[in-house]
Image (cartoon, grey):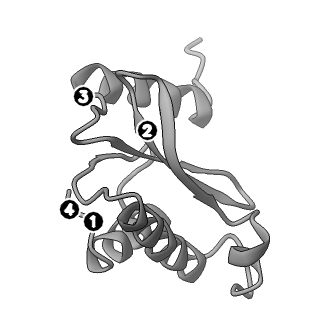
Amino acid sequence: MVSKKSRSEVRKKKHMKLRNRFSGTAERPRLAVFRSNNHMYVQIIDDTAANTLVSASTLQKDVKAELEKTNDVAAAAYLGKVIAERAKEKGITEVVFDRGGFIYQGKVKALADAAREAGLNF
């Protein structure tokens, strides 16, 4: 009998394949996305220095106050705008997008599109 892997195991394996292909540098850091059932988390990471430069999530009070729900496409789009604004304040305009093994649709796509519209290039 063939055993089926859980979705989280499949996602982690996809993420490791993606991470082997690229990493964030000081000139072009990595925009990492993690999505749980209730919240979304975004970080801009310099992998060479192992340092998080900017982060945002739907758990933060200033972000959560603007949202009706924290786990829908509108929340993801707002989070993309917030991370782009915070990155611009730090002088970051170019990033590498790391979807974290998640399929590029729905919330992940909304976050990416909103970040692009707000000024991040990837």
> The disc labelled 2 sits on which kind of residue?
Ile
> The disc labelled 4 sits on which kind of residue?
Asn
> Of label 3 and label 2, which has the lower sequence position?
3
Residue 22: assigned label: 3
User: Which-is-in-front pick, marks 3 and 2?
Assistant: 2
The extreme front residue here reads 90
> Of label 2 and label 4, which has the lower sequence position?
2
> The disc labelled 3 sits on which kind of residue?
Phe
Determine the residue positioned at 58% across, 36% down: 7
Q: Depth check: give the residue in front, 15 or 42.
A: 42
Whole-angstrom CA distance, mark 3 to mark 2, is 12 Å
* Residue behind mark 4: 121
* Residue behind mark 1: 120
Q: What element carries label 2?
A: strand
Q: How crowded is mark 1: few (under 14 residues within 10 Å), some or many (20 or more)?
A: many
Whole-angstrom CA distance, mark 1 to mark 2, is 14 Å
Determine the residue positioned at 36% across, 70% down: 115
Q: Is mark 3 on a helix, strand or loop?
A: loop
> Of label 3 and label 1, which has the lower sequence position?
3
> In the picture provided, is 52 more to the left or to the right than 115?
right
> In the picture provided, is 121 more to the left or to the right than 51?
left
User: Percent position (x, y) of residue 105?
Assistant: 38, 64
Q: Depth check: give the residue in front, 64 or 21.
A: 64
Vertical relation: 39 (above or below) 34: below
> Of label 4 and label 3, which has the lower sequence position?
3
> Of label 1 and label 2, which has the lower sequence position?
2
* Residue behind mark 2: 45
Residue 84: assigned label: none
Q: Depth check: give the residue in front, 105 or 97.
A: 97
